[in-house]
Amino acid sequence: MHILSIVSGVLALVLAVFWAGVGISGLSGRLERNRWFGVRSEETMRSAEAFALGNKVAAPGFLAAALVLLIGGVLAFGGDLGFLFGFGGVIAAFVIAAVAAGVGVRVAATVPEPEEESGGCSADCCSSGTDEQHADDPAADCGTASCGSCALQGMCTTEHAAEPTQPADAAH
């Protein structure tokens, strides 16, 4: 048996196990939002609901890719030209998985954006004062009784806090 046949067969079988695991996890809803496995795009990563839905829709395609890989991997051990089945299965499976992921992304895009939680802060970044007081300088309350959302957004850095407050039209 040719070494390329063995390599392509093993590669196809390992990828079959991987795609089967991702497909089963996505279909059953056990695949939690992460940065390594499943359909990961801007649309799916914006909420746990979008991630779960996108991966659930893509899961049958992932399982089909796993099946193609399994068949290609087994046929790769069939002789000197078996590597064509192994590598052909890998290529076909990646095409199937890419199409399935694309469908998952499109479905995840239909999930509404999650509402931002303010954590008790007002909608204008800083909780002390009025909107008019923060119109010119949103970091005007740095160091005062604020919820800290400005500091979390980098508004209360040492450089910014040291700058004198200027009217918005005088800054240019």
Image (spheres, rainbow, N blue to C red):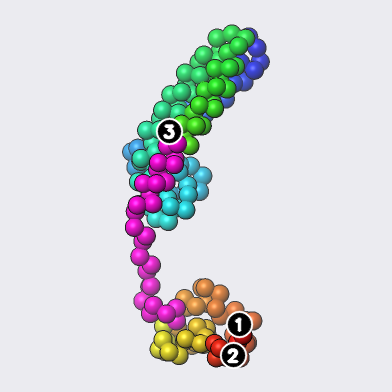
Task: Please state the horizontal and vertical placement of residue 107, each as a whole percent of the image.
Answer: 36, 46
- The residue shown at (48%, 37%) is 98
Q: How many marks?
A: 3
Q: Could you say which quadrant of the image residue 124 lies in?
A: bottom left
| Amino acid at pointer 1 | His
Residue 54: horizontal and vertical position, in percent? 38, 45
Q: Nearer the viewer, residue 118 or 102?
A: 102
Residue 157 in magenta stretch: no
Q: Amino acid at mark 2?
A: Ala
Start-end of magenta stretch: 99-126
**Which residue is the site of mark 1?**
160
In the rendered image, the vertical position of residue 52 relative to residue 16, given as above or below: below
Q: Label 2's element?
A: helix
Up/down of 73 relative to 138, above or below: above
Separation of residues labelled 3 and 2 (CA atoms) = 57 Å
Is 100 magenta? The answer is yes
According to the image, label 2 marks what residue?
Answer: 170
Rounded to the nearest angstrom, the CA distance separating label 2 from label 1 is: 17 Å
Q: Which mark is residue 62?
A: 3
Give above or below for 96 relative to 79: below
For the residues labelled 2 and 1, say whether their Cβ atoms are less than 8 Å apart. no
Q: Quadrant of residue 166?
A: bottom right
Q: Mostly what secondary structure, the magenta segment?
A: loop
Q: Nearer the viewer, mark 2 or mark 1?
A: 2
CA neighbours of label 1 inside 10 A, class few (<14), some (14 to 19), many (20+):
some
Rendering coords of residue 136 (x, y %):
51, 87
